[in-house]
Image: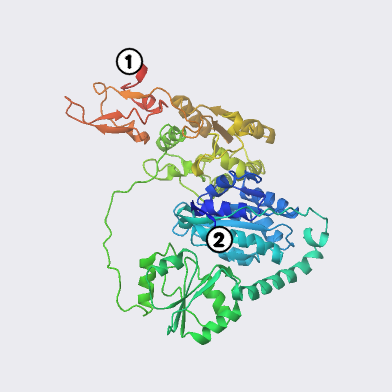
Amino acid sequence: MIGDKKILSGNQAIARGFYEGGGLIAASYPGSPTVEMMESVKEYEGIYAEFSVNEKVALEVAIGGSFYGARSMATMKHVGVNVAMDPLMTFTETEVNGGFVLVSGDDPGMASSQNEQDNRIIGKFANMGVFCPGSSQEAKDYMVQALELSEGFGMPMLVDITSRVCHSRGVVECYDRKDKKPQGFTPDNSKYTMLPPFTHERQHAMADRIKKLSEYAYDFKLNLLEEVEGSRVLLVATGLMYYNLKELKLPYSIYRPGMVYPLSKRRFSEFAERYERIIVIEELMPFMENEIGLMGIRCEGKNHFSFTGELNSEDIERGLAEAGLITERSTKDHKDVEVPSRPPMFCSGCPHRPVFDVLKKMKVKVMGDIGCYSMAVLPAFTAAHTMISMGATVGITKGMNKAMRLLGDDEPIVSVIGDGTFFHSGMTGFANLLHQSSPEDNMTFLILQNGTTAMTGGQPNGSSGKYDNSEGMDIGIRQLLETMGFDNVREVDQFDYKTLKDAIAEETKKKGISVIITTRPCALRFKIKEPHFYVDPKICIACRTCVKTNCPPIRMKKYEGIDKLKSSIDKDMCVGCSVCSQVCPVNAIKRSEVESS
């Protein structure tokens, strides 16, 4: 049977595999590198797909589908799995009804993440089978196989895919969907109620199915052995490492396990008899190396390769040269060329910019959080001073506040959190603020309500309906907080620069807990465009106050007939937010309507 060939990214291929494999229920929380998986799944008919309020809820939605017998999937980035760990670690005890796959987007090199964890380890910890695709074709094929094996062995599966595989494209053979009708939910406490005494038996059941899956792995079709006659060295590589290794065209045998956990002890025992050296090439943690070592089989790996970052072909070649397998490097060393840094920055008209311009000038301690506003830690603002995980700013602010007060420090603290993050994991932190609050506290919380989960591409959140009724929910954050018991909550239009500045100044001087909700929507997500601004160079004094707001359309340039550089605004980039005109001390920046009149 010949499939229809399409060019797909790894993310799109995961979605296609879920579709072809008869998937019905899919849920996710947006986070790079896995965002496009759910966006692609939404394009297929016959599948229910949603972006949930956080990863824990997304996992639980998919668990519910699986309980009913529907093939289900939850997708999230690697740190999102941490949020979902509570239900995950108990769900994996159950006997799976409908095939279940958790897709984790790992990020070697931290291209868009705050840490670099290896979720293959979580897969083992949770007693799941673990698959590691290295191409778009493998992403689709492994997804189909994971769904089938999930049902065949009665256990959840983990597909662990990395950023580069998620975003790279390749030719994929696509086939028709294999519909699988759910068998429904039949109450059975021994399967679905994970409380003692049922859990005692399930611990043994988990160990038994891992053993059976290990035996199945011996000749599993996704585990590929490429033997080279006369080779006494076996290189073990999976995922993208396999393809990077293949580029070197070395005279050594290669074993590529598509399923990296559990590995077949029987297979590796045979390898140990056949090969003098077994060298494992893998990014991040020595996961497979450790698994092989636990079998009592001698192997090498991380002593030749970096424990952090991606491993491209040059890195693999360097490591194998260190291992003595390559006597002469086939590629020449190259000198790194220094180029000017180009840090990420807020979009034109971003409503976060005036907030951090004010905070920077106030020179207050700012506890940050995860979202577009994370960029405030970078130049030119450097106006946020902590950044850990989603929703963490609320608890961190409280903890620092309590420590300061114990030591007699009455300096104010400001906390910044977005509306998407507020709904994700900030609400519980706000509830905890009311626990043992003190009149001596001085905490000001800024909730940046832009109506979207902007950093990952503009997915809707609980506030999106405030700006676009077609998007769904419209949860009033102010009303919610006031219902909780907060009595000092105010809303501010941050494009009214003076009012914003005065509001923050007033609240940081007050004792107690203050909440300021900024109300401007994301300019990019909601396509906001007002008449642009321009600079009158005859009035401009070249003080660069406008430039320091870090707005992309603003730059210094040479005007004809004027000796020194003056500020200017690219009218094609300007969306008319007006912040630059409000900070200009000499009123040299005006809206285009004034120019035309």
Residue that sits furthest to the front in the current view = 1
Q: Quadrant of the N terminus?
A: bottom right
**Residue drawn 62% across and 47% down?**
54
Q: Is residue 402 visible?
A: no
Q: In the image shown, does 252 or 307 lie closer to the viewer? A: 252
Dividing the picture into quadrants, the one containing residue 304 is: bottom left
Expressed as whole percent of the image width and height from the top left, the position of residue 504 reads 49, 31
What residue is pinned by disc 1? 596
Label 2 amino acid? Asp
Label 1 amino acid? Ser
Expressed as whole percent of the image width and height from the top left, the position of residue 507 reads 53, 32
Q: Earlier in the sequence, mark 1 or mark 2?
A: 2
Q: In this rendering, which labeled residue sits more in front, label 1 or label 2? A: 2
- Classify 186 as above or below 322: above
Q: Quadrant of the C terminus?
A: top left
What residue is pinned by disc 2? 160
Q: Is residue 544 visible?
A: yes
Q: In the image shown, does 567 or 144 lie closer to the viewer? A: 144
